[in-house]
Amino acid sequence: MNKLRIGIAGLGTVAQGVLQLVKTNGSLMSRRTGVELIVQRIASRSAKPGVDLLGAVFSTDVHDLVADPDVDVILELIGGEGLAKDLIESALAANKPVVTANKAVIAGYGDQLLAQGNAPLRFEAAVAGAIPIIQSLNQGLAANRIDAIYGIINGTCNYMLTVMEEEGLAFDQVLSQAQELGYAEADPAFDIDGIDAAHKLTILAALGFGTSYDFSALYVEGITQITAEDIQYAKELGFKIKHLGIAMHTDAGLETRVHPALVPSTALLASVNGVMNAVQVVSDAAGETLFSGPGAGGAATASAVLADVLSLGTSGLIGSARALESKGRSLNQAQAAGTAPAMHRLAMDDIRSACYLRIPTVDRPGVFAQVASALSAHSISIEAVIQKEQPLEDASVSIVILTDVVVESVVNAALTELAALDTVVGKITRIRVAPTH
Ligand code: HSE
């Protein structure tokens, strides 16, 4: 039996999930992989009475994990950026393999961390919780050219959009509900503004397309502008609204964008509801593959963390400086930027998509003709229109238009013109239609 001594940084939900999973499934893991996991040391700011540490040594300084020669691999489960990044750097500098669930650190500093030292750095748990999407991109689909990755990769957004659709509730009501249920953070901005999904898409784009781990290169939009009314109109047009991360290669270049999108109601992703996550990968040989599962939670995330740990345990790298030198670095290189030919990243202004537009206008004859004429002046074709006769509470009416596929900069120019019309009396909502392959 190959013994693997782990050191855990942090004692929050994910760390507790790891301890619990080792306790319940440790023997099963050993039988399956030949690796016996021993929790050697745990470091956290404060102890948590009542948590079974499985006999591990406890200290309050996470750097003790690096210094302890009896720790073979460090699990960074602190979260945040400062201390977590510092710990990962020190561990890799000391040639200690690291497994992390930290999407923000990888999305911001993945390039430099993967280039550092000889020890492997693994982060399956950083994207879509339990779903083994990183292993699938690195290994399962390794023989493929990846053409597109579409992900529902924020459970909070997916939960909120699902409940808004099913119960017709307003955004704020559903947000409070999500917070009460513990799905959304007390400060929900990371989720609802799209930042969390963008961290995850940065990682998926790097693995699928060899881009750098550059979070700032993505276009990011959250779900705060979506209303129950939009969801209802989208349904009438045959779509669901999902918050998507999209990394897609077109003839014009690579698109990396995170925003709400209209997804045909019959599409695979349309049926992924509630807090569930899903990632659809389109590749040349395997075709369309869909991975779905829980994207958060202690046990689900622990499953991904321990998948990385066990894979390191069976890799022959642990405890052998020579193996680390020859193989650890190449393992990191396989996940580092530049593994695919450099791709031109398309500016958001240049992407092409069909758009849903909800335009609040005064209820007066001739207004629709005015709106249609403004779109026509920019050569934007209209695919479908909805206009209800019944005015809203403020006496305005919504004109809802589905456009043909059009370049983003052209839609932007048309929206500026529409917003300036004196018959348009509120903010225009634009939701892009998800691309199809
Ligand atoms: N807050 C995230 C979500 C889970 O709602 O999906 C952790 O990434």
Image (spheres, rainbow, N blue to C red):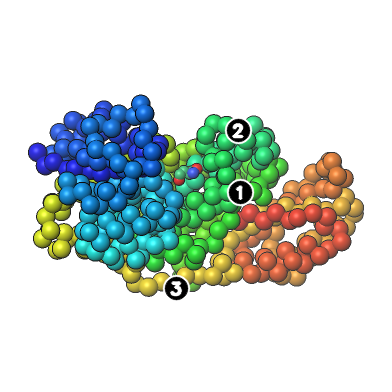
The kind of secondary structure element at disc 2 is: helix
**CA gap, disc 2 to disc 1?**
16 Å
Instruction: Residue at 59% x, 69% y: name it.
Output: 349
Of the numbered discs 3 and 2, the one sitting upstream in the chain is 2
The foreground one among 399 and 341 is 341
Q: Residues within 10 Å of mark 3 (few under 14, many from 20)?
A: few
| Left or right: 257 in relation to 227 | left
x then y, percent, for residue 253 = 46, 70
Q: Image quarter for residue 282?
A: bottom left
x then y, percent, for residue 24 = 26, 28
User: What residue sits right under mark 2 in the picture?
Assistant: 177
The foreground one among 11 and 296 is 11
User: What residue sits right under mark 3 in the picture?
Assistant: 344
Mark number for residue 44? none
Q: Residues within 10 Å of mark 2 (few under 14, many from 20)?
A: some
Q: Image quarter for residue 404?
A: bottom right
Amino acid carrying mark 1 in the image = Ile
Amino acid carrying mark 3 in the image = His
Instruction: Residue at 25% x, 61% y: name it.
Output: 93
**Res 340 visible:** no
The kind of secondary structure element at disc 3 is: loop
| Left or right: 156 in relation to 367 | left
Depth-wise, is mark 2 or mark 1 nearer the camera? 2
The foreground one among 168 and 43 is 43
x then y, percent, for residue 111 = 35, 65
Q: Residue furthest right?
A: 364
Amino acid carrying mark 2 in the image = Gln
User: What residue sits right under mark 1 in the picture?
Assistant: 223
Of the numbered discs 1 and 3, the one sitting upstream in the chain is 1
**CA gap, disc 1 to disc 3?**
28 Å
Q: Image quarter for residue 430?
A: bottom right
Instruction: Residue at 49% x, 51% y: name it.
Output: 197
